[in-house]
Image (cartoon, helix red, strand yellow):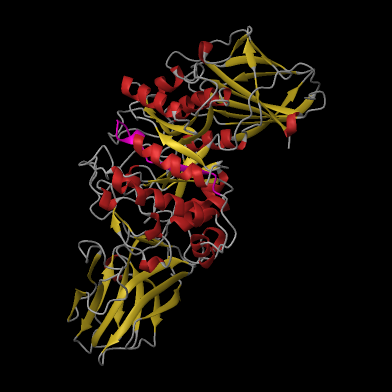
Amino acid sequence: MSVRTVAISLTVLAATVVTATGRRPAAAPVTLVLGVDHPGASIAKTMVGVFFEDINFAADGGLYPERVKNRSFEFPDALMGWKRATPAAGAFTVRTDAAVSANNPHYLRVEGTDPAQPFGVMNDGFRGIGVEAGKSYVFSVVARRVGNGPTALRAEVGGALGAVYGTARVDGIGPNWQRHSVTLVPTRTQPSGRLSVFLDGPGAMDVDVVSLFPAETYKNRPGGLRKDLGELLDALHPGFLRFPGGCIVEGRYLEYRYQWKKTIGDPADRTLIVNRWNDEFVNKPAPDYYQSFGLGFFEYFQLAEDIGAEPLPILNCGMACQFNSGELASMNRIDQYIQDALDLIEFANGPITSTWGKRRADLGHPAPFSMKLLGVGNEQWGPDYLPRFAAFQKALKAKYPDVQLVASADPFIDRPAAKEQSASLRGMGADLIDEHFYRTPDWFLAHASQYDGYARTGSKIFVGEYAAHVRPVGSGESRNVWQAALAEAAFLTGLERNADVVRMSAYAPLFAHTDAWQWTPNLIWFDNLRAFATPNYYVQQLFAANRGETVLPISRDGKPVEGQDGLFASAATVDGGHGFLVKLVNATDGPMPVRIEVPGAGDATGEAVFIAADPLAENSLAAPDRVKPIQEPVTMNAGVIERTLPAHSVTVLRPAR
């Protein structure tokens, strides 16, 4: 490695607090030595990724930006989200005769009887319907005229007291089911409006798949993903995208498990099911939470490709969620679950001459997605999981030996049974074992050395879900404060130092609607029109964007820096070994002067990017930039960088680019 000509830039993400007694006096500088001549393990591209689960209305009402709730009248309460839009004479009923399709058997018959006043129905969306002034929205509907009913209808976005913000007219509706679409451009911004659909005269009309969708989407795909949320994901620089969950993969019962084949094809023909988080928490019920699968497996693969991340799908292994029913498919029925996994690999990677490779091509993606990772179950434990994983492993490795399989660890990682399960999985040669941690900030600070003592050979670790909770887990009271993000940063330095053991990690959950959440904390929050990144997001972004290539030792008094006196650190090579980066965490409540010695390096200039905030500071829709980086210059003289780390701070030194 050559360090004599390296240019250094310093990125500092820092939060500063003034205590009741004032700042702690600055101590003598802490001297750190970078072992540039002793590179260690490679750091996987997947070290920092993202985990998507449809919780907190993350898909319908979130990343999948359909504005209409229950657009196909397939909720168990087929009229949920719908009501009369006018006092005009008329009626509306749900019917099933001569439906659009077998997977979408319900539709709405709307009939008006007043020739002087149009009759219509109204949808209240996902906590309202959000539209922006001057933006284009595609209103579409599958409709047919009944008898001598009207041949046109009018779509209208409005608000309180009869206010109308935008209208569009659909003409030429005939006696057979047909999809019609028009563009609607609101004149005012409304985050919580309503969509009304009015008949153009007396008579009856059948309507189904009623949709209002933004014309502008992420990557400008028709019917694509919400633009601002997609861009926030892209800006994270994630190494992988784990999808679709989480507990929803397993389902409360196997009947409601996630079945990937039912999530591809025409979105209007995908079979809706209840979301597992519909009534999980009695204090946060969501009776209108269902999965339309407008965001399905093809869209997940496409999103992973768009953001440059490795796709990591998780499949059901014949076990329902063990926090709920724990229902099991018998081992003599497990072959159908294994076949679904084999077919998924073919769908992702197979040539267009294969059955499922052709399905992928027919959906518009003839090139393979090059999937390299596949998860078998989620948060499974006990004696029933191991034989199921073994059956998957045998079948999948026989046909696709290069696809790495992720095995589920017991989520209660500290109990003896969990250690026995992990030992068994290691004995079976599992490629990766998925461990989850929802703990206090103090736990994360104390466990930055979590993987220091792990075996250096055999199965690798995927820290598949983790987040620091400042209040009890599941209480809904934890917040995305800087204190939590700082502890996660300290933990991440430990994962990087142990890159020969830990190959992947992801914060969880990813998304939450501010008016429809079930779980806190979350990485990105949004309402119907706006979104903001949390302090935790900026930590994830910092580590993902500054991943490095090969671990370098960084020492203090000849020992690895792993939390002594509140200081945490990791380091790595970059630029093919010709440069380096260093990450530092000051978890104390006072400034910490540091002297970083880089043997063989000379002079260089760079920049510092930092954040100053109270440990309890958090971002919000009203103040999205309260915790966010700021830049300033920094220098290296004769191979030494001297800088005072602010209290409660994260710092990254990296080569200039």
Q: In the rendered view, would you say 297 is above or below 655?
A: below
Residue reaching furthest bottom? Answer: 148
**Vertically, is 145 above or below 407?**
below
> Is 150 inside the magenta-drawn segment?
no
Residue 203, percent from left and from top:
23, 88
* Location of the C terminus (image quadrant): top right
Position above or below: 233 against 450: below
Magenta stretch: dominant secondary structure: loop
Q: How many marks?
A: 0
Front-most of residues 416 and 58: 416
- Identify whether 140 is placed above or below 534: below
Task: Judge by depth and name the residue closer to the eye, 126 or 277.
Answer: 277
In front here: 592 or 412?
Answer: 412
Left or right, residue 275 beside residue 92: right
Residue 21 at what x, y percent from top left? 44, 13
Residue at the spot x=44%, y=40% of the render? 394
Residue 176 visible in the displayed image: yes
Asked whether 396 or 81 is in front, the reply is 396
- Report the magenta residues as a range: 371-386
Q: Position of residue 375 (x, y in %)?
A: 44, 41
Asked if residue 24 shows in the view, the reply is no
Is 380 inside the magenta-drawn segment?
Answer: yes
- The quarter in which the N terminus is drawn is top right
